Amino acid sequence: MLRTLLAISLISIAVSCAHKDAGKALRKSPRTTGHETQSLSQQANTFSDSAFYVGYVDYFPETREFYTALYYRDGHEYPDEDLLESKLDSVIVFEDDWGRERLPMEDARELLVLSGLDTLLVFDRENQLVCTCPLNRVEYLWNGLESNFIAVFKADRDFGPQTGELYGVSASLPHDHFQKLSSREVRDANLNSSIIKALDISNAHDWHMRHYRIDPAGATYSIISSSTESGESRSYLAVSDNEKAEILNEEQENYQYLNILPVPILMNGKPLLLIPAGYPSSDVLWDYLAGFNGNSYEAIEYNRLPL
């Protein structure tokens, strides 16, 4: 049920819903998870309480609520976790191996980034609106592996078990920023071979590949990752069409891309991407929002759009 309960080997990638692999003790900005960010991050650093959020969302069927992980405000990290834990004032759910406890909103606003979360539009991977959800409360979610501060949103009805990927966007984001865009996964061994050839990367590796066809642009976005028993690892984010293929990002001996979820909001002519990532052969996994800077995709701090 909870993506925080999943810890898998990176390249075995049992990743039918890859963002659910993204366990972390508390969501941090991409700056603090090893991503090198430049122009987009510098813009996002100036975000205010009117900034717009885009990020993965999960669902609690037992209380009929959606939730998303929270970031600490700049300058506040793990030492503040104990302080916030001391302010928890009531139990929402308590089981043997996991639980949820309420954090008063005034304490949450002091140390956690809540901008853009007053009301969230929740979408599925097909970009269909699932729910318009007001912020209900802030909670501390814990289990035997880790803990997370989360924003919890009231659903307008019972959605039952949610096994597919969901993402949320600030309801205050102006409607004209949304584009008509669809993405579908393409599974084709011939496409795998043609992209490896077009990108001129070694076919000696055992590549894990996932492809998403974006329409109406007619482009295919791909992740291409490989690691070896000796520890060598490579990962690419690429885009291709009928005429050419190009690498948009490359990671060597670093983290790898697990999956992508294209979001129908354009930045410099290309869709925003939600990217689950992690380190090979470890359970250090996370996800982040990335935008196109004109040359490559880079992480956007706090998942807040620098519009």
Image: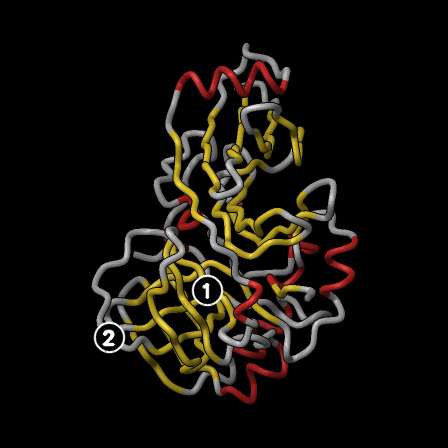
| Residue at the image position 66 percent from the left and 57 percent from the top | 300
**Label 2: how many Cα within 10 Å (few below 14, some 14–19, many 20+):** few
Measuring from the top left, give residue 43's x and y in whole percent: 76, 63
Query: What is the number of the mark on residue 157?
Result: 2
* Residue type at tag 2: Arg
Near-viewer residue (101 or 50)? 50
Near-viewer residue (306 or 61)? 306
Q: Which residue is label 1 attached to? A: 168
**Label 1: how many Cα within 10 Å (few below 14, some 14–19, many 20+):** many
Measuring from the top left, give residue 124's x and y in whole percent: 37, 56
Measuring from the top left, give residue 182's x and y in whole percent: 43, 47
Name the quarter where the N terminus is drawn: bottom left
Against 70, residue 172 (above or below) is: below
Quarter of the rendering containing residue 235? top right
Against 144, residue 206 (above or below) is: above
Single out the residue that lies furthest toward the top. 204
Mark-to-mark CA distance, 2 and 1: 17 Å
Q: Secondary structure at mark 1?
A: strand
Near-viewer residue (179 or 54)? 179
Measuring from the top left, give residue 296's x and y in whole percent: 70, 41
Name the quarter where the C terminus is drawn: bottom right
Quarter of the rendering containing residue 233? top right
Q: Going from the N terminus, do you reach mark 2 or mark 1 first?
A: 2
| Residue at the image position 68 percent from the left and 55 percent from the top | 32
Q: Are marks 2 and 1 in contact (CB under 8 Å)?
A: no
| Residue at the image position 40 percent from the left and 66 percent from the top | 122
| Residue at the image position 65 percent from the left and 28 percent from the top | 246
* Residue type at tag 1: Gly
Residue 16 as seen in the image, left or right of residue 204: left
Q: Secondary structure at mark 2?
A: loop
Q: Is residue 34 visible?
A: no
